[in-house]
Image (spheres, rainbow, N blue to C red):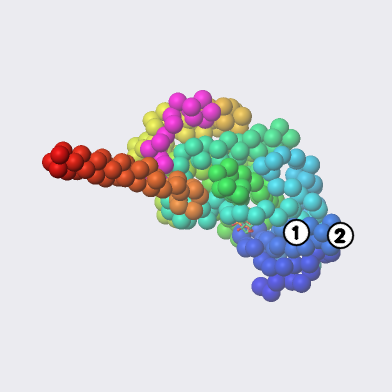
Amino acid sequence: MKVPNRIGRYYVENELGNGSFGTVYKAFDPRTKRVVAIKVLRESLHEFRDRDEIEEDHTRFKTEWEAVGKLRHPNIVIVHDVGEYEGGPFMVMEYVPGEDLKRVFKKGKRLPIRKSLRIMDQLLAALEHSHKNDVVHRDIKPSNIILSSNENLTNEHITVIDFGIARLPESTLTKDGRAPGTPAYMSPEQLNSRRDLDGRTDIFSAGVIFYELLTGAHPFGPVADDGYVHRVLNDVPTPPSKKAGAVPSAFDSVSLKALARDRKDRYATAGEFAQALRTLAPAHDCADFEGEESDDHEIPSPQRAWPQSVDVYICIGIIFLIIGYCMAYWMI
Ligand SMILES: Nc1ncnc2c1ncn2[C@@H]1O[C@H](COP(=O)(O)OP(=O)(O)OP(=O)(O)O)[C@@H](O)[C@H]1O
Ligand SMILES: [Mg+2]
């Protein structure tokens, strides 16, 4: 699709990507002089709707986005504005530089466990805040988590995006009744199309991400095969410590509790999940994960060439001293 020059008052620079709900553009706001990201909802979401129903959907999206816009948290994207472009709603948010976690996962290297725990801590803090403000994300997945590193590349910061996007009215289900998007991070109750979703659906999705961070594998994978949904609805995943080497077994119970099939058996709040992880962290320094750090995140430690050279020079000096002493003794 052609990249528009302008969306409302915003000058579009380039397309950042597109997902199941729409396209995201990087743009410039001449009024505030800031760079923003604009998500425009896909037209095909309205395929089977009449005009009144579409308008009703737009109102619902805008109401939801306005609620998200009231959230103020360091790990939640700031929503600046909502508007309408060519008959469809769009959302203007802060532009977050960095790389989404989906791309990080695609590189195939597991992150060190301490870094994974810091990511989880921030993700759960964002969820705790939004749930306390009655906003359920509904679409927590790696592509909706942007990882930005600071200058010395040690203290990564995450920003959760796409709050409220997945508040799909029934209308936007596809012809065969499925919601657009991947079910890979959906909770059992979401897969069962329950309408009374609460914060625990996000806790399940965060649990899937935690499992992937620990093991590099999906707890119910492979996602693409026919039995996937059946496994989410019926199976208990293999404990992470049995799935991948170097995962301390103490992480198993926390991981499996977040992934419990029945939401009553999960952590009741994101704060409880975060607390459980925090109590594990100091007990497991997890140095055994360090070898799997991707080289683009860690600063290499400086070469220890100087002390080694000193040792060599001292040895050579001692040898010369001994030779000199022997020669002097022989000559006398
Ligand atoms: N506020 C933002 N700042 C910077 N990049 C963003 C922002 N919002 C989205 N992106 C990027 O735009 C791309 C497309 O995002 P989009 O949400 O459309 O896709 P998705 O998350 O893969 O799918 P879905 O529609 O199911 O959420 C992603 O790479 C995402 O990281
Ligand atoms: Mg997204």
Q: Is residue 61 left or right of residue 263?
A: right
Residue 109 coordinates in the image, percent (x, y): 43, 51
Is 274 or 311 nearer to us in this picture? 311
Q: Which residue is drawn at 45% across and 52% down?
A: 295
Which quarter of the picture shows residue 307? top left
Which type of secondary structure does the marked residue at label 1 adopt?
A: strand
Q: Does the residue labelled 1 lie within 8 Å of ligand 1?
A: no
The label number, if any, that marks residue 106 in the structure image:
none
Queried whether the magenta region covers residue 279, the answer comes back as yes
How many marks on residues? Answer: 2
User: Horizontal and vertical percent for residue 67?
Assistant: 78, 43
Q: How crowded is mark 2: few (under 14 residues within 10 Å), some or many (20 or more)?
A: few
Tell me which amino acid carries mark 1.
Val
Residue positioned most to the front:
332
Residue 35 is marked as 1
For the question of whether residue 277 can be seen, the reply is yes
- Which residue is at 57% across, 31% downward? 274
What residue is shown at x 72% (from left), y 68% (from top)?
13
* Quadrant of the snapshot with the C terminus: top left
Relative to 326, is 106 above or below? below
Question: Is residue 229 shown to the viewer in this render?
Answer: no
Q: How far apart are marks 2 and 1 (CA)?
A: 11 Å
Q: Which residue lies furthest to the bottom in this view?
A: 2
Circles 2, 1 touching at the beta carbon (< 8 Å)? no
What residue is shown with label 2?
31
The crowd level at tag 1 (other Cα within 10 Å; few <14, some 14-19, many 20+) is some
Quarter of the image for residue 181 reads bottom right
Secondary structure that dominates the magenta span: helix
What residue is drawn where x is 61% and y is 44%?
157
- Tell me which segment is drawn in magenta: 277-292
Query: The residue under label 2 is which amino acid type?
Result: Arg
**Front position in the image: 201 or 101:** 101
